[in-house]
Amino acid sequence: MPSGRLILPPLEERPACSVVIPCLDEEPYIEAVVRAAMTQLYPPSLIEILVCDGGSTDRTRDVVADLAAADPRVQLVDNPGRFPSAGMNEGIRRARGDVIVRMDAHAEYAPDYVAAAVDALRRTGATTAGGAARSRARGPFQRALCAALGSPLGVGGSAYRDPSREGFVESVWSGAFRREVFERVGLFDAEARANEDAELNQRIIEAGGTVYLSRDMVAFYYPRASLGALSRQYFAYGKGRARTLLRRRRLLSPRPLVPFAALTIFAILAAITAAHPPAWPLLAAAALVYAAAIAAEAVRVARRTDLALLPRLLVIFPAMHAAHGAGVWAGLVRGIGAALPEPERLSAR
């Protein structure tokens, strides 16, 4: 196991766990995820469930209130900050468990998810443990997107996207945290709209902690169902990466900045061509190389999954890249010179 400066006491065999579920207008999904938390294969008396609602205007709060009336372990927590990062902080402040387990409303969790999280933390001594981001589809666009998310061209080879991986990594999806980590390195960045998990895990690693990816922590999520929603999501991801870069002054890997670099190169070549038209072959050559790479990978992924997905893959890959790169630019322009205070620390018990 990697050594580090963030040394935590040994974890009990069956520690108390607090499941925190941030949500906002999740009426179609919230009951399923709360029930998944309620029926975990873990001693019921050692689990509490904190649903942190950002002011839903649908029936989300009513559904949670009904579940709470049937099971006192379920609590409805107000999240004035609305977004998941602020919701996680509201839940963590109220949590009584030694392990904080994040569950997202748009996901399905295995019955032994909490038990597997505790096992991974105890077995490895990690500060944080999580499973791979396994995607599921309910329609043709989501099927194509799930295929794209399994491609290095779609996610840049991120370890947490690979369900076969096991070991120490830079970040994980959702995850379970030792409570002490929030006392040592601080809570989630409450102002972040995306990338809050990666930013927190970077702080953990910089403080000498470790993040572990476990094959035994199984959960599935449903990705965006339209090109517009996907583009908005990846634009937000890009802004989140920029915020992390400005706050931390570096990223653990340059991989998330590849779309930003590619978009910047195309913008520079376009500007050169506009100022000096004879330079157009440079822009054309770059565009042809990019288009060839997209086409080759789209064909490879479609052959491996379903050839009917090819037309959508040819659009999904460039949409992800352009939106993420533009998001990084927007985040840098907006964030340079802005005050970005460190997240507050959780008070020690």
Image (cartoon, rainbow, N blue to C red):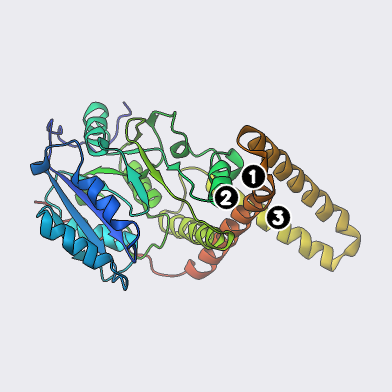
Picture residue at 89% right of the left edge, 64% below the top? 277
Q: Earlier in the sequence, mark 1 or mark 2?
A: 2
* SS for callout 1: helix
CA distance for labels 1 and 3:
29 Å
Q: Which residue is mark 2?
A: 140
Label 1 Cα crowd, 10 Å radius (few <14 / some 14-19 / many 20+): many
* SS for callout 3: helix
Instruction: Indicate the position of residue 149 as horizontal and vertical percent values.
Output: 54, 43
Of the pair 245 and 238, the residue shown nearer to us: 238
Give the amino acid type for the residue marked by disc 2 in the picture.
Answer: Pro
User: Mark 1 against mark 3, which lies toward the viewer?
Assistant: 1
Can you tell which mark lies on residue 232? none
Instruction: Indicate the position of residue 315 as horizontal and vertical percent values.
Output: 67, 53
Vertical comparison of 274 with 153: above or below? below
Picture residue at 33% right of the left edge, 54% below the top? 105
Label 2 Cα crowd, 10 Å radius (few <14 / some 14-19 / many 20+): some
Instruction: Indicate the position of residue 292 as horizontal and vertical percent values.
Output: 76, 43
Q: Which residue is mark 1?
A: 309
Residue most toward the bottom?
57
Asked if residue 132 shows in the view, the reply is yes
Instruction: Indicate the position of residue 222 as horizontal and vertical percent values.
Output: 44, 50
- Badges 1 and 2: C-beta atoms under 8 Å apart? yes
Give the amino acid type for the residue marked by disc 3 in the picture.
Answer: Ile
Picture residue at 37% right of the left edge, 65% below the top? 340
Location of residue 345 (image quadrant): bottom left
The N terminus: image quadrant: top left
Q: Which residue is mark 3?
A: 265
